[in-house]
Image (cartoon, grey):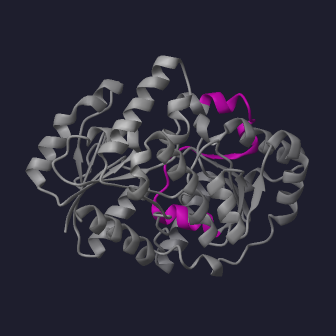
Protein backbone atom coordinates (compact mmCIF):
# COMPACT_ATOMS: atom_id res chain seq x y z
CA UNK A 1 0.00 0.00 0.00
CA UNK A 2 1.20 3.50 -0.86
CA UNK A 3 0.04 6.36 1.39
CA UNK A 4 0.51 10.11 1.12
CA UNK A 5 0.14 11.89 4.48
CA UNK A 6 -0.76 15.58 4.27
CA UNK A 7 -0.34 17.27 7.62
CA UNK A 8 1.66 19.59 9.87
CA UNK A 9 5.22 18.50 10.55
CA UNK A 10 4.54 17.77 14.22
CA UNK A 11 5.89 14.88 16.33
CA UNK A 12 2.57 13.02 16.20
CA UNK A 13 2.50 13.11 12.38
CA UNK A 14 6.12 11.97 12.17
CA UNK A 15 5.33 9.11 14.55
CA UNK A 16 2.45 8.07 12.29
CA UNK A 17 4.84 8.25 9.33
CA UNK A 18 7.45 6.09 11.09
CA UNK A 19 4.89 3.59 12.42
CA UNK A 20 3.43 3.03 8.95
CA UNK A 21 6.93 2.49 7.58
CA UNK A 22 7.57 -0.16 10.23
CA UNK A 23 4.44 -1.95 8.97
CA UNK A 24 5.85 -2.02 5.45
CA UNK A 25 3.67 0.77 4.08
CA UNK A 26 5.19 2.88 1.29
CA UNK A 27 4.52 6.26 2.90
CA UNK A 28 5.21 9.88 1.98
CA UNK A 29 4.64 13.10 3.91
CA UNK A 30 3.88 16.59 2.58
CA UNK A 31 3.56 19.69 4.74
CA UNK A 32 3.52 23.47 4.67
CA UNK A 33 6.44 25.41 6.05
CA UNK A 34 8.95 22.56 6.36
CA UNK A 35 12.61 23.48 5.91
CA UNK A 36 15.55 21.08 5.43
CA UNK A 37 13.87 17.78 6.15
CA UNK A 38 14.40 15.18 3.45
CA UNK A 39 11.47 13.12 4.72
CA UNK A 40 8.98 15.80 3.73
CA UNK A 41 7.69 17.29 0.48
CA UNK A 42 7.59 21.02 1.21
CA UNK A 43 4.34 22.67 0.10
CA UNK A 44 5.67 26.14 0.90
CA UNK A 45 4.72 28.50 3.68
CA UNK A 46 1.14 29.53 4.41
CA UNK A 47 1.09 33.28 3.86
CA UNK A 48 -2.69 33.61 4.08
CA UNK A 49 -5.85 31.52 4.15
CA UNK A 50 -5.92 31.75 0.34
CA UNK A 51 -3.00 29.28 0.24
CA UNK A 52 -5.48 26.58 1.28
CA UNK A 53 -7.20 27.08 -2.08
CA UNK A 54 -4.11 26.05 -4.04
CA UNK A 55 -5.53 22.61 -4.82
CA UNK A 56 -3.08 22.16 -7.69
CA UNK A 57 -0.23 21.60 -5.23
CA UNK A 58 -1.92 18.47 -3.86
CA UNK A 59 -3.14 17.31 -7.26
CA UNK A 60 0.36 17.57 -8.77
CA UNK A 61 1.84 15.63 -5.84
CA UNK A 62 -0.78 12.90 -6.14
CA UNK A 63 -0.12 12.61 -9.87
CA UNK A 64 3.63 12.35 -9.19
CA UNK A 65 3.48 9.85 -6.28
CA UNK A 66 0.41 7.83 -7.32
CA UNK A 67 -0.64 6.90 -3.75
CA UNK A 68 -3.44 4.46 -3.03
CA UNK A 69 -4.65 6.62 -0.12
CA UNK A 70 -4.35 10.29 0.82
CA UNK A 71 -4.40 10.77 4.60
CA UNK A 72 -5.16 14.46 5.23
CA UNK A 73 -4.98 16.04 8.67
CA UNK A 74 -7.05 18.99 9.94
CA UNK A 75 -10.28 19.28 8.01
CA UNK A 76 -10.18 22.94 7.01
CA UNK A 77 -6.52 22.83 6.01
CA UNK A 78 -5.12 19.72 4.34
CA UNK A 79 -8.57 18.13 4.24
CA UNK A 80 -9.89 21.08 2.25
CA UNK A 81 -6.85 21.08 -0.03
CA UNK A 82 -7.62 17.45 -0.91
CA UNK A 83 -11.22 17.87 -2.10
CA UNK A 84 -10.22 17.39 -5.76
CA UNK A 85 -8.01 14.37 -5.09
CA UNK A 86 -8.15 11.58 -7.63
CA UNK A 87 -7.49 9.09 -4.83
CA UNK A 88 -9.57 8.10 -1.77
CA UNK A 89 -9.08 10.64 1.03
CA UNK A 90 -9.02 9.73 4.73
CA UNK A 91 -9.36 12.86 6.89
CA UNK A 92 -8.20 13.04 10.50
CA UNK A 93 -10.18 15.60 12.51
CA UNK A 94 -8.02 17.27 15.17
CA UNK A 95 -10.82 18.93 17.09
CA UNK A 96 -10.79 22.71 17.00
CA UNK A 97 -11.47 22.96 13.27
CA UNK A 98 -14.82 21.29 14.03
CA UNK A 99 -15.60 22.51 17.54
CA UNK A 100 -14.39 26.14 17.39
CA UNK A 101 -13.56 27.50 13.94
CA UNK A 102 -17.10 27.61 12.45
CA UNK A 103 -18.43 29.30 15.60
CA UNK A 104 -15.91 32.05 16.32
CA UNK A 105 -15.39 35.48 14.80
CA UNK A 106 -17.57 37.58 12.51
CA UNK A 107 -20.51 36.04 10.68
CA UNK A 108 -18.76 35.98 7.27
CA UNK A 109 -15.76 34.14 8.68
CA UNK A 110 -18.04 31.67 10.44
CA UNK A 111 -20.04 31.09 7.25
CA UNK A 112 -16.94 30.51 5.13
CA UNK A 113 -15.45 28.04 7.61
CA UNK A 114 -18.74 26.22 8.01
CA UNK A 115 -19.01 25.83 4.20
CA UNK A 116 -15.38 24.70 3.96
CA UNK A 117 -16.03 22.09 6.64
CA UNK A 118 -19.20 20.89 4.95
CA UNK A 119 -17.56 20.60 1.53
CA UNK A 120 -14.48 18.87 2.94
CA UNK A 121 -16.56 16.40 4.96
CA UNK A 122 -18.79 15.65 2.00
CA UNK A 123 -15.79 14.94 -0.23
CA UNK A 124 -13.89 12.77 2.30
CA UNK A 125 -13.95 9.02 1.71
CA UNK A 126 -13.46 8.18 5.39
CA UNK A 127 -13.15 10.33 8.53
CA UNK A 128 -11.59 9.53 11.89
CA UNK A 129 -10.93 11.42 15.12
CA UNK A 130 -9.83 10.76 18.70
CA UNK A 131 -12.93 12.38 20.19
CA UNK A 132 -16.47 11.01 20.00
CA UNK A 133 -17.84 14.52 20.56
CA UNK A 134 -15.80 15.77 17.59
CA UNK A 135 -17.29 13.03 15.43
CA UNK A 136 -20.82 13.91 16.56
CA UNK A 137 -20.29 17.62 15.82
CA UNK A 138 -18.87 16.79 12.39
CA UNK A 139 -21.99 14.73 11.65
CA UNK A 140 -24.12 17.73 12.64
CA UNK A 141 -22.23 19.83 10.12
CA UNK A 142 -22.63 17.23 7.36
CA UNK A 143 -25.14 14.48 8.14
CA UNK A 144 -24.17 12.32 5.15
CA UNK A 145 -20.84 11.33 6.77
CA UNK A 146 -22.38 9.31 9.62
CA UNK A 147 -21.61 5.93 8.05
CA UNK A 148 -18.10 7.06 7.07
CA UNK A 149 -16.96 8.38 10.46
CA UNK A 150 -15.24 6.55 13.31
CA UNK A 151 -13.39 7.58 16.44
CA UNK A 152 -10.39 6.02 18.15
CA UNK A 153 -7.18 7.30 19.67
CA UNK A 154 -4.54 7.51 16.93
CA UNK A 155 -1.53 8.86 18.82
CA UNK A 156 1.61 6.88 19.60
CA UNK A 157 3.77 6.34 22.68
CA UNK A 158 7.02 8.29 22.81
CA UNK A 159 9.86 5.96 21.77
CA UNK A 160 11.97 4.88 24.73
CA UNK A 161 15.62 5.94 24.47
CA UNK A 162 18.47 3.61 25.39
CA UNK A 163 19.75 3.70 28.96
CA UNK A 164 22.87 5.61 27.95
CA UNK A 165 20.87 8.13 25.93
CA UNK A 166 18.38 8.59 28.78
CA UNK A 167 21.18 9.40 31.24
CA UNK A 168 22.81 11.82 28.79
CA UNK A 169 19.53 13.56 27.89
CA UNK A 170 18.55 13.90 31.56
CA UNK A 171 21.88 15.56 32.32
CA UNK A 172 21.66 17.86 29.29
CA UNK A 173 18.11 18.95 30.20
CA UNK A 174 19.17 19.70 33.77
CA UNK A 175 22.07 21.78 32.51
CA UNK A 176 20.00 23.70 29.96
CA UNK A 177 16.85 24.32 31.99
CA UNK A 178 17.72 23.56 35.65
CA UNK A 179 14.88 21.04 36.01
CA UNK A 180 14.06 19.41 39.32
CA UNK A 181 12.29 16.15 40.19
CA UNK A 182 8.63 15.15 40.62
CA UNK A 183 7.61 17.74 38.06
CA UNK A 184 4.34 19.55 37.45
CA UNK A 185 4.27 19.99 33.67
CA UNK A 186 2.01 22.30 31.67
CA UNK A 187 2.66 20.64 28.34
CA UNK A 188 0.18 22.01 25.81
CA UNK A 189 1.77 25.33 24.87
CA UNK A 190 0.34 28.83 25.15
CA UNK A 191 -2.03 29.18 22.19
CA UNK A 192 -5.43 30.54 23.18
CA UNK A 193 -7.17 27.21 22.63
CA UNK A 194 -4.97 25.70 25.37
CA UNK A 195 -6.30 28.13 28.00
CA UNK A 196 -3.16 30.06 29.05
CA UNK A 197 -5.33 32.18 31.39
CA UNK A 198 -6.35 29.11 33.37
CA UNK A 199 -2.79 27.79 33.31
CA UNK A 200 -1.51 31.11 34.68
CA UNK A 201 -4.01 31.11 37.56
CA UNK A 202 -2.94 27.62 38.64
CA UNK A 203 0.75 28.47 38.36
CA UNK A 204 0.41 31.74 40.29
CA UNK A 205 -1.41 29.95 43.10
CA UNK A 206 1.30 27.27 43.25
CA UNK A 207 3.98 29.98 43.33
CA UNK A 208 2.19 31.73 46.19
CA UNK A 209 2.34 28.46 48.14
CA UNK A 210 6.10 28.25 47.65
CA UNK A 211 6.31 25.39 45.16
CA UNK A 212 9.89 25.11 43.91
CA UNK A 213 10.27 26.80 40.50
CA UNK A 214 12.34 23.81 39.31
CA UNK A 215 9.17 21.69 39.48
CA UNK A 216 6.93 24.10 37.55
CA UNK A 217 7.59 23.32 33.89
CA UNK A 218 5.82 25.12 31.04
CA UNK A 219 6.44 23.97 27.47
CA UNK A 220 6.40 26.47 24.62
CA UNK A 221 5.43 23.68 22.19
CA UNK A 222 4.14 25.34 19.02
CA UNK A 223 3.25 28.69 20.60
CA UNK A 224 4.16 31.87 18.76
CA UNK A 225 6.45 34.50 20.21
CA UNK A 226 3.45 36.82 20.61
CA UNK A 227 1.66 34.15 22.66
CA UNK A 228 4.75 33.71 24.83
CA UNK A 229 5.04 37.46 25.40
CA UNK A 230 1.36 37.63 26.37
CA UNK A 231 1.92 34.82 28.88
CA UNK A 232 4.85 36.69 30.41
CA UNK A 233 2.37 39.34 31.52
CA UNK A 234 0.38 36.69 33.41
CA UNK A 235 3.17 34.72 35.16
CA UNK A 236 6.51 35.70 36.70
CA UNK A 237 8.94 33.74 34.52
CA UNK A 238 11.68 33.79 37.16
CA UNK A 239 9.42 31.54 39.28
CA UNK A 240 8.96 28.79 36.64
CA UNK A 241 11.02 26.77 34.17
CA UNK A 242 9.97 27.78 30.66
CA UNK A 243 11.12 25.34 27.97
CA UNK A 244 11.44 27.75 25.07
CA UNK A 245 11.87 25.24 22.24
CA UNK A 246 10.43 22.01 20.91
CA UNK A 247 11.76 18.91 22.65
CA UNK A 248 12.94 15.79 20.87
CA UNK A 249 11.27 12.44 21.51
CA UNK A 250 14.10 11.44 23.86
CA UNK A 251 13.83 14.72 25.73
CA UNK A 252 10.05 14.41 26.09
CA UNK A 253 10.38 10.83 27.31
CA UNK A 254 13.00 11.85 29.88
CA UNK A 255 10.95 14.83 31.04
CA UNK A 256 7.75 12.82 31.44
CA UNK A 257 9.54 10.06 33.37
CA UNK A 258 10.30 12.75 35.97
CA UNK A 259 6.76 14.15 35.92
CA UNK A 260 4.25 13.60 38.71
CA UNK A 261 1.36 15.55 37.19
CA UNK A 262 0.67 17.06 33.80
CA UNK A 263 -1.95 19.74 33.33
CA UNK A 264 -3.89 19.80 30.04
CA UNK A 265 -6.87 22.15 30.25
CA UNK A 266 -7.65 23.30 26.69
CA UNK A 267 -10.94 24.86 25.64
CA UNK A 268 -11.29 22.42 22.73
CA UNK A 269 -9.56 19.15 21.95
CA UNK A 270 -10.01 15.53 21.06
CA UNK A 271 -8.04 12.98 23.07
CA UNK A 272 -4.43 13.56 22.11
CA UNK A 273 -0.84 12.85 22.99
CA UNK A 274 -0.75 15.73 25.45
CA UNK A 275 -2.91 13.57 27.72
CA UNK A 276 -1.81 10.05 26.85
CA UNK A 277 1.96 10.36 26.37
CA UNK A 278 2.81 11.47 29.93
CA UNK A 279 0.16 9.18 31.44
CA UNK A 280 1.75 6.12 29.83
CA UNK A 281 4.99 7.08 31.61
CA UNK A 282 3.31 7.38 35.01
CA UNK A 283 2.20 11.01 35.21
CA UNK A 284 -1.20 11.91 36.65
CA UNK A 285 -3.44 13.93 34.23
CA UNK A 286 -5.26 17.08 35.37
CA UNK A 287 -7.76 17.81 32.60
CA UNK A 288 -10.45 20.24 31.49
CA UNK A 289 -14.02 18.96 31.25
CA UNK A 290 -14.07 18.19 27.53
CA UNK A 291 -16.20 15.21 26.49
CA UNK A 292 -13.23 13.15 25.26
CA UNK A 293 -11.33 13.91 28.47
CA UNK A 294 -14.30 12.94 30.62
CA UNK A 295 -14.56 9.65 28.73
CA UNK A 296 -10.85 9.06 29.37
CA UNK A 297 -11.19 9.87 33.08
CA UNK A 298 -14.07 7.38 33.47
CA UNK A 299 -11.86 4.58 32.18
CA UNK A 300 -8.54 5.70 33.65
CA UNK A 301 -7.15 7.86 36.46
CA UNK A 302 -7.45 11.65 36.09
CA UNK A 303 -8.74 14.82 37.75
CA UNK A 304 -11.29 16.71 35.65
CA UNK A 305 -11.65 20.49 36.12
CA UNK A 306 -14.94 22.17 35.23
CA UNK A 307 -14.16 25.77 36.23
CA UNK A 308 -10.64 26.93 37.12
CA UNK A 309 -11.86 30.04 38.96
CA UNK A 310 -14.39 28.24 41.14
CA UNK A 311 -12.21 25.18 41.76
CA UNK A 312 -8.78 26.84 42.00
CA UNK A 313 -8.16 26.19 45.70
CA UNK A 314 -9.24 22.54 45.36
CA UNK A 315 -7.14 22.05 42.21
CA UNK A 316 -3.99 23.47 43.75
CA UNK A 317 -4.52 21.60 47.03
CA UNK A 318 -4.84 18.37 45.04
CA UNK A 319 -1.71 19.13 43.00
CA UNK A 320 0.38 19.92 46.07
CA UNK A 321 -0.72 16.71 47.81
CA UNK A 322 -0.34 14.48 44.76
CA UNK A 323 2.80 15.87 43.15
CA UNK A 324 5.05 13.45 45.04
CA UNK A 325 3.24 10.40 43.70
CA UNK A 326 3.42 8.64 40.36
CA UNK A 327 0.43 6.68 39.07
CA UNK A 328 0.36 3.23 37.56
CA UNK A 329 0.25 3.15 33.77
CA UNK A 330 -0.72 -0.54 33.59
CA UNK A 331 -4.27 0.31 32.50
CA UNK A 332 -3.00 2.18 29.43
CA UNK A 333 -1.49 -0.79 27.64
CA UNK A 334 -4.04 -0.53 24.82
CA UNK A 335 -2.57 2.85 23.77
CA UNK A 336 0.24 1.12 21.92
CA UNK A 337 1.57 1.46 18.39
CA UNK A 338 0.32 -1.86 17.04
CA UNK A 339 -3.22 -1.27 18.24
CA UNK A 340 -3.33 2.23 16.75
CA UNK A 341 -1.83 1.20 13.41
CA UNK A 342 -4.27 -1.71 13.14
CA UNK A 343 -7.16 0.78 13.40
CA UNK A 344 -5.63 3.19 10.90
CA UNK A 345 -4.93 0.44 8.39
CA UNK A 346 -8.50 -0.76 8.83
CA UNK A 347 -9.70 2.77 7.99
CA UNK A 348 -7.52 2.77 4.88
CA UNK A 349 -8.96 -0.55 3.76
CA UNK A 350 -12.52 0.78 4.23
CA UNK A 351 -11.60 3.80 2.14
CA UNK A 352 -10.30 1.55 -0.61
CA UNK A 353 -13.58 -0.38 -0.54
For the image, the number of numbered tags is 0
Specify the quadrant that holds the N terminus: bottom left
Residue 265 located left or right of residue 169:
right
Residue 180: x, y in percent?
A: 71, 60
**Closest to the observer: 329 or 180?**
329
When the figure is inspected, residue 169 is found, relative to residue 235, above or below; the finding is: below
- Residue at horizontal 57%, vertical 37%? 191
When the figure is inspected, residue 203 is found, relative to residue 185, above or below; the finding is: above
Which quadrant holds residue 256? bottom right
Magenta span includes 278: no
- Residue at horizontal 11%, vertical 56%? 66
Specify the quadrant that holds the C terminus: bottom left
**Closest to the observer: 286 or 225?**
286
When the figure is inspected, residue 278 is found, relative to residue 167, above or below; the finding is: above
Which quadrant holds residue 23? bottom left
Residue 323: x, y in percent?
A: 80, 64
What's drawn in magenta, residue-wise?
229-257
- Residue at horizontal 54%, vertical 67%? 253
Residue 169 located left or right of residue 311:
left
Amino acid sequence: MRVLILGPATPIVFRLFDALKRRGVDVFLASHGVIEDDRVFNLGRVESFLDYFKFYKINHLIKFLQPDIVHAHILNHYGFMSIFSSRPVVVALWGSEIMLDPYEGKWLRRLILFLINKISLKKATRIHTSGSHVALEAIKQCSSIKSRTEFYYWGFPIPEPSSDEYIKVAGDLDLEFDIGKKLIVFNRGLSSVYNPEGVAKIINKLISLGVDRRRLIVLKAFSSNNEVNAFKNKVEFSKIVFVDRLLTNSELYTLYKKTSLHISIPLSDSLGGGVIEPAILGSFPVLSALPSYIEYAKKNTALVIHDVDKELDFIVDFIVKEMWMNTSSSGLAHYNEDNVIDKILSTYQKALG
